[in-house]
Each structure stands twice: as C-alpha cells, then as structure tokens.
Image: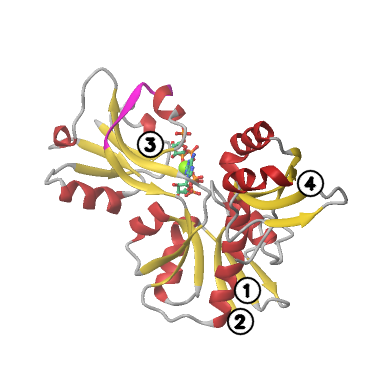
Amino acid sequence: MLRVAVPNKGALAAAASEMLGEAGYRKRHEARDLTVLDTVNEVEFFFLRPKDIAIYVGSGELDLGITGRDLALDSGAPVEEILGLGFGGSTFRYAAPAGRDWKIEDLQGKRLATSYPRLVRENLKQHGVEAEVIRLDGAVEISIQLGVADAIADVVESGRSLRQHNLVAFGDSICVSEAVLLQRAGTEHTRPKDQLKARLQGVVFAQHYMMLDYDCPRSLLEAAIAITPGLESPTVAPLADDDWVAVRAMVPRKEVNRIMDELAETGAKAVLASDIRACRL
Ligand SMILES: Nc1ncnc2c1ncn2[C@@H]1O[C@H](COP(=O)(O)OP(=O)(O)OP(=O)(O)O)[C@@H](O)[C@H]1O
Ligand SMILES: O=P(O)(O)OC[C@H]1O[C@H](OP(=O)(O)OP(=O)(O)O)[C@H](O)[C@@H]1O
Ligand SMILES: [Mg+2]
C-alpha cells in the first residue's frame, strides 16, 4: 500500500484534493478526516499540516507527499521533488516599510520576522548578512507595525498583503514556489509511486492544454497545421464535402484565443475549444 501525505488545510489543501480526485483517487468525506484508504488504487492518504509533510516523507514513514516547495526547503528534511503540480504558486520575498530603496545588505543587524526561519537564515548566510531572525506563525506583515521587527520575509502571491501594510518587496526572490510532489531523497522508483506520479502529471498536463477542433478548406490545410502543429501531429479527418477536412490538435491553454483568432483569419470554420480532463502522453 502506497502512503501519501496531502495538505489538510491552508492554501494548498483544496487544490491538492481536487487534483487527486481528478486523477481518480478517493476523496475524503469529512474535512476533519486524517486518513483515507483508497483500496481500489491501493493508496492510503494522510491529511497532515503542509509544514509537516516534508518531515514525514523525509523520514521515510510516508512514500510521497504534496506540499509547497518553500515549506519543503524550510523543513530541511531530506526530500526531493519529483513533479511540479502547477498550483499554489508564490514567491518568497524580503519586504520592509516603503519610502526607502532597500537592499539585502541593509538587513545587517536588523530584526527580521518570518514563518520560514531556515530558508531565511540560509539566504542571509549566502549574502553574508547577519540579522536576528524572529520566528512568527503568521500575520507576519503586521510585525513591523507592532514593533517586533524591522523587516520581514514572507510569501507573496498577489502582493495585496504587502500593499495593505505599506511594505515593499526587495532583493531577488528567496524562493519561487509551487505545490510539488515529493519523495525521500535518493529513494528508488517503484511501480505504485510512478503510477501516482503519472496520474498527477496527466492532470497537470490536461490543465495546461486544450483540445481544438475545426473545419478547414483542404487548400488551406498546410497553413492551418502550421498554426496548430499539435504535440506529435494533428489528426486530419475527411468531411462529406471533399474540399474540406476536420482537424483536431492540442494547444496550450494560455494561447488558445490567439490561435483561434489566427485560424479564423486563415479561413477555418467552426473552431471549437474544449477542456481535457486527464491524459497520458
Ligand atoms: N496567498 C498565499 N498565502 C499563503 N501561502 C500561499 C499563498 N499562495 C500560495 N501559497 C503557498 O502555500 C503554502 C503555504 O500553505 P500553508 O497552508 O502553510 O499556509 P496558509 O494558507 O497561510 O495556512 P496557515 O496560515 O493556516 O498556516 C506555501 O507553499 C505557499 O508558497
Ligand atoms: O500576496 P498576497 O496575495 O496578499 O498573499 C500573501 C499573504 O497570504 C498569506 O497569509 P495568510 O492569509 O495565509 O495569513 P497568515 O499570514 O496568517 O498565514 C501569506 O502569509 C501572506 O501574508
Ligand atoms: Mg498563512
């Protein structure tokens, strides 16, 4: 039985469960359940705090885990990423009161509040800066206002929290994060692990691509195929009218509207875009 850790709450929990559901695994009925046994797929899921997941996986107690790259790095646990999952994206940045052009060297001798102390200490060390790191559990942005810190290092997604507290981010990102699938560093491939990875990869891929179907005059087929080359090569099928063909190709989701515009301008008709739920490539 494969043992897999999944975030039980917080920013990654809903999307992680959603993705596992899309990949065909059993979902938990109650938000407070700590385990789910999926006997069909021979997987036991453990719903744990995202901060703790790398520790369980690194210790070898659990085979795989889903958590944030930044959290995994901060744990210091011996884990390695085997798949980026494309959700829970954020950057981890230094920030300090607006109105000054802050540099990382300015943190020398300052008090720095963060929920990710190991990540921050390592980054400060790399820059040769000595600062007092103050560990807080959350609401880090307010710590400067409340007088316990001079600057912070925190997760930035939209930047709204920083703006709200009149803070500016500075320096390069300490970490560019997303949700990742982890295993203990150096462990071998096994069939059950590879299967779960392949299923999640199928969902991630399906989320990044769409299927385009359209009709195209045979005389314009070459131009149309240049716009939608597909992954290997598009499917071209005959239509009842000999002068026309039907084309089917996968296209990157982000570019779907530009591609549809180009196809329409080229002379394609009935251009339809549809979602892909899962795939194996
Ligand atoms: N807006 C966001 N706020 C917090 N974390 C985010 C955000 N967007 C993405 N993440 C990622 O989610 C993970 C943090 O999740 P976690 O559940 O620990 O934080 P949280 O949602 O702030 O929960 P809590 O505050 O209850 O600890 C990190 O990997 C982080 O990069
Ligand atoms: O850039 P933004 O889109 O504003 O998102 C980032 C903010 O969201 C998170 O806080 P959360 O709401 O989880 O509260 P917390 O600080 O108590 O964890 C994170 O810690 C930042 O404060
Ligand atoms: Mg938080």
Q: Is residue 105 left or right of residue 59?
A: left
Q: Is residue 99 left or right of residue 42?
A: left
Eye-nearest disc, 2 or 3: 2
Q: Is residue 245 left or right of residue 174?
A: right
Between 8 and 92, the one lying in front of the other is: 92
Q: Is residue 102 left or right of residue 72?
A: left
Which amino acid type corresponds to the residue marked 3 in the rendered image?
A: Val
How far is disc 3 from disc 4 in space, using C-alphas?
61 Å
For the residue labelled by badge 3, is the local secondary structure a helix, a strand or a loop? helix
For the residue labelled by badge 1, is the local secondary structure a helix, a strand or a loop? strand
How far is disc 2 from disc 3 in space, using C-alphas?
40 Å
Which residues are the magenta region? Answer: 164-171
Mark 2 burial class by Cα count in 10 Å: few <14, some 14-19, many 20+: few
Q: Which numbered disc covers residue 244?
A: 4
Query: In this figure, which residue is indicated by the disc labeled 3?
Result: 140
Residue 166 lies in the magenta-colored region: yes
Q: Earlier in the sequence, mark 3 or mark 1?
A: 1
Do the residues under discs 2 and 1 have CB atoms within 8 angstroms? yes
Which amino acid type corresponds to the residue marked 1 in the rendered image?
A: Glu
Whether the residue carrying mark 3 lies under 8 Å from ligand 2 is answered with yes
Which amino acid type corresponds to the residue marked 2 in the rendered image?
A: Met
Q: Earlier in the sequence, mark 3 or mark 4?
A: 3
Principal secondary structure, stretch drawn in magenta: strand
- Identify whether 5 is placed above or below 261: below
